Image (cartoon, helix red, strand yellow):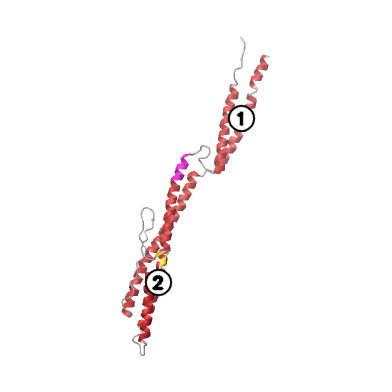
Amino acid sequence: MAFQVNSNVTALNVYNNLSVHQAKSSAALARISSGLKAAGGGDIASQGTAATLNAATQSTQSSISQVQSAINRLQAADTTYGEMIALGQKGLEVAGRVNDAGADTSAITAQLTALTAGITSINSNTQVIGGVWTAALTPDVGVTTFTATPTAATPPATQNTAGYTTFIEGTVDLRATNAGNLASLQNTLQVLNAVAANEAAGIGQAQDTDIAKEMMNLTSANIMTDAATAMLAQAMQLPNSVLKLLQ
């Protein structure tokens, strides 16, 4: 009965192992070169997590933009209130001189008229980013919106100390409310910036590969590939060795 060598099982096993190590080397190299866990058929789920966080980050960035815009408007409103109060204080000073001995009442009246006109002009004509300074503000701050709309001041009803005193007191109250809203939005902006930073870190943790770990995987796979290649060369000679023994 003749002896036959139909296949080299050892060589096939070594070849299969070589293919496995080459695949691992290729996958590790893909993750290192791209920086992504999902590269090379890796952690595909990381893409879904990163996509969800990316959507959340975009929403947060939109809120940051809206809140910053609202802050800019409220800061402009604060300046507006401040300038009207300054004119009101000047009016109060001038009105207080009307009873001075030898006072030029006609000049005082003219100056008070001009001061009141200045207050009215600032109150009515001030614009911020192309819109009136008292435009409604409803920035998105996350789950809901925050309403902070500056209120127009009421100019002095009479050009005397009582009229300017009433105007100053009312405008100071409006400025105080505006300042409270401004402080709230500034704190909200800090929170949103912190949220955005954490979301960015989360995206990195979800999708970015561990380069050190993948370098180890690549080195290990390359070593095993070199060893398997050497073993395959030896295993391929086994049929020849058997045939030589049979000769």
- Amino acid under label 1? Ala
Residue at (60% x, 32% y) in the render:
225
Residue 228's label in the rendered image is 1
Q: Which residue is mark 2?
A: 82
Tally of numbered discs: 2
**Dot 2, crowdedness within 10 Å: few (<14), some or many (≥20)?**
some
Q: Image height check: is 89 above or below 145?
A: below
Tell me the quarter of the image containing the C terminus.
top right
Where on the picture, by quarter, is residue 99? Answer: bottom left
Give x and y (percent) for residue 60: 43, 53
Q: CA distance from mark 2 to mark 1?
A: 81 Å
Question: Does dot 2 land on a helix, a strand or a loop?
Answer: helix
Which residue is pictured at 56% across the width and 39% down the height?
30
Given residues 110 and 197, the one toward you in this image is 110
| Residue 99 or residue 29, whichever sits in front | 99
Q: Amino acid at mark 2?
A: Gly
**Quarter-of-image position of residue 161:** bottom left
Chief SS of the magenta region: helix
Residue 97 is covered by the magenta coloring? no
Q: Position of residue 109 (x, y in %)?
A: 35, 83
Q: Where does the magenta region start and end?
A: 43-51
Choose between 212 and 59: the one closer to the eye: 59
Residue 173's tag is none
Which element type, helix, strand or loop, lies under badge 1? Answer: helix
Is residue 88 in sight in this rendering? no
